[in-house]
Amino acid sequence: IQIKVLGPGCVQCDRLEQDLSRFLPNSDISRINRAPANEAVIVGVDTFECLLKCKKLHEQTFQAFDITIGRLIQYHKNSKKSGIPPDSGRIKSLLKNTGMHLLELNEDKKTVSKAVSELELDLGGFGKGYAVDRMADELSEWDIRNFMIHGGMSSVYAAGRMKSYNGWKV
């Protein structure tokens, strides 16, 4: 049995995409990416919470997880597409403008600012996972205990169990 949840849950998921997508021009992430250095960008509560979680993960992984590498990712994608190997000098230049230390999160004002204009955020799969987790929280608040959220090939969240199966059939 497959039940599609419509209503407030879907609205929240759409809202999170509107906040966290780097592809939507009016999203919080796109507005941060377009902002010049040291300009405070007011963001939504969920965006701010997501960025705090990214910062914490950055610290826990000894800087291995880094959402500030948007331009570097784009450079590698363009290089692969064009067939021209990446230039090590260009990579070094791009790396100078990356790092969570260049991103200031003001918790009181819910603002984000960048120390350098060139820094671009790319939440990658973290944003989708964050949205899936928020949906799971909301379903739990609605006292729904057995559910599976499928957020695409890389993001699935299951809780409880299906009565007719021994677990979730995937």
Image (tube, rainbow, N blue to C red):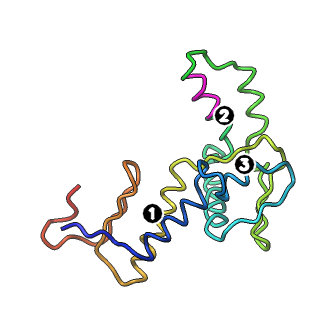
As measured in the structure, the alpha-carbon distance from the residue carrying label 1 to the one carrying label 2 is 26 Å
**Mark earlier in primary sequence (1, 3):** 3
Tell me which residue sits at (39%, 76%) in the image: 139
User: Does the magenta segment cover residue 76?
Assistant: yes
Q: Amino acid at mark 3?
A: Asn
Q: Amino acid at mark 2?
A: Leu
161 is higher (above) or lower (below) than 37: below
Q: Is residue 124 left or right of residue 113?
A: left
> Residue 145 in the image: x percent, y percent?
32, 78
Residue closest to the eye, 96 or 113: 113
Q: Residues within 10 Å of mark 3 (few under 14, many from 20)?
A: many
- What range is drawn magenta here? 74-80
> Residue 35 in the image: x percent, y percent?
79, 51
> Residue 62 in the image: x percent, y percent?
65, 47
- Pointer 3 residue: 33
Q: Is residue 38 left or right of residue 153?
A: right
Q: Amino acid at mark 1?
A: Val
- Pointer 2 residue: 72
80 is higher (above) or lower (below) than 35: above
Q: Which mark is residue 132?
A: 1
139 is higher (above) or lower (below) than 167: below
**Mark earlier in primary sequence (1, 2):** 2
Badges 1 and 3: C-beta atoms under 8 Å apart? no
Q: Quadrant of residue 141?
A: bottom left
Name the secondary structure under disc 2. helix
- Quadrant in the picture for the N terminus: bottom left
As measured in the structure, the alpha-carbon distance from the residue carrying label 3 to the one carrying label 2 is 13 Å
**Mark earlier in primary sequence (3, 2):** 3
User: Does the magenta segment cover residue 39?
Assistant: no
Query: Of helix, strand and loop, which mostly describes the magenta segment?
Result: helix
User: Which is more foreground, mark 3 or mark 2?
Assistant: 3
